[in-house]
Amino acid sequence: MMHEGANFWIRRAEPNHARDYIRLIKGILAESPPVDTPYAPGEFNPATGTIRELIEELNAGDNSLFLIAESEGVIGALTCRGGELEASRHCTSLGIYVAQPVRDQGVGSALMRHMVEWATASPLLERIELDVFAGNARAIHLYEKYGFVREGVKRRMYYRGGVPIDMLMMALLLEKKP
């Protein structure tokens, strides 16, 4: 599927995107100043096969999703991992990454729009949740633009350079007609 008016495409990830996805995340983790992620640069080093399996697992689930944004390689990714218990199958947890050179160019918004359309069309999903660094105004703005609301704060969830970092919990509840 093509994102209108831009030179990138949004589509479901395929196992052969695993290497590009790893490259994307490693590039983001190497940024200075560091981006808001709990990973330290050396802590993300999965085997390509592990990411291939993750892509297959998420795209096979009826409450999970793995999208990529492509333009001469993977420039963004969005994952939704659905609840595995009967009691939580209506929930999915969101994660999103966009390469630094293409931030503020609509890639994150396009990924979010496709994810919300997918979730809204699902007869199963009612809740999309995420955690975001409390000081990440750009990301919080993007999530609020798509209807996410603040639900709480995980105080001192992470430490970076000895400084505690709070995480904001946000969710989007989808109204489903019976």
Image (cartoon, grey):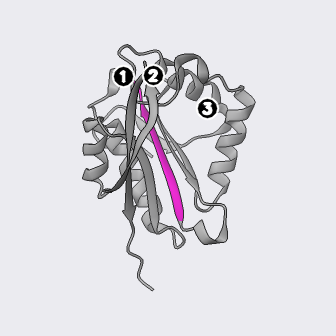
Residue type pointed to by label 2: Ile
Residue 162 within the magenta-colored segment of the rendering: no
Residue 93 within the magenta-colored segment of the rendering: yes
The single residue placed furthest to the bottom in the displayed view is: 178
Q: Main secondary structure of the magenta part?
A: strand
* Residue that numbered label 3 is attached to: 17
Q: Residues within 10 Å of mark 3 (few under 14, many from 20)?
A: some
State which tag comes first along the sequence, 2 or 1.
Answer: 2
Foreground: disc 3 or disc 2: 2
In the image, residue 63 sits, relative to residue 114, either above or below, namely below
Residue 80 in the image: state x and y as whole percent.
53, 50
Q: Are marks 1 and 3 in contact (CB under 8 Å)?
A: no
Q: Which residues are magenta?
A: 91-99
> What label does residue 16 carry, if any?
none
Foreground: disc 1 or disc 3: 1
Residue at the spot 41% in from the left edge and 52% down from the top edge? 114
Residue at the spot 40% in from the left edge and 57% down from the top edge? 116
Q: Residues within 10 Å of mark 2 (few under 14, many from 20)?
A: some
State which tag comes first along the sequence, 1 or 3.
Answer: 3
Measure the C-alpha gap from mark 3 to mark 2: 17 Å
Q: Are marks 2 and 1 in contact (CB under 8 Å)?
A: yes
Q: Quadrant of residue 69?
A: top left
> What label does residue 100 carry, if any?
1
In the image, residue 19 sits, relative to residue 119, either above or below, namely above
Residue type pointed to by label 3: His
Nearest to the observer: residue 7 or residue 108: 108
Whether residue 66 sits left or right of residue 154 in the image: it is right
Helix, strand or loop at mark 1: helix
* Residue that numbered label 2 is attached to: 28
Residue at the spot 39% in from the left edge and 69% down from the top edge? 174
Helix, strand or loop at mark 2: helix
Residue type pointed to by label 1: Gln
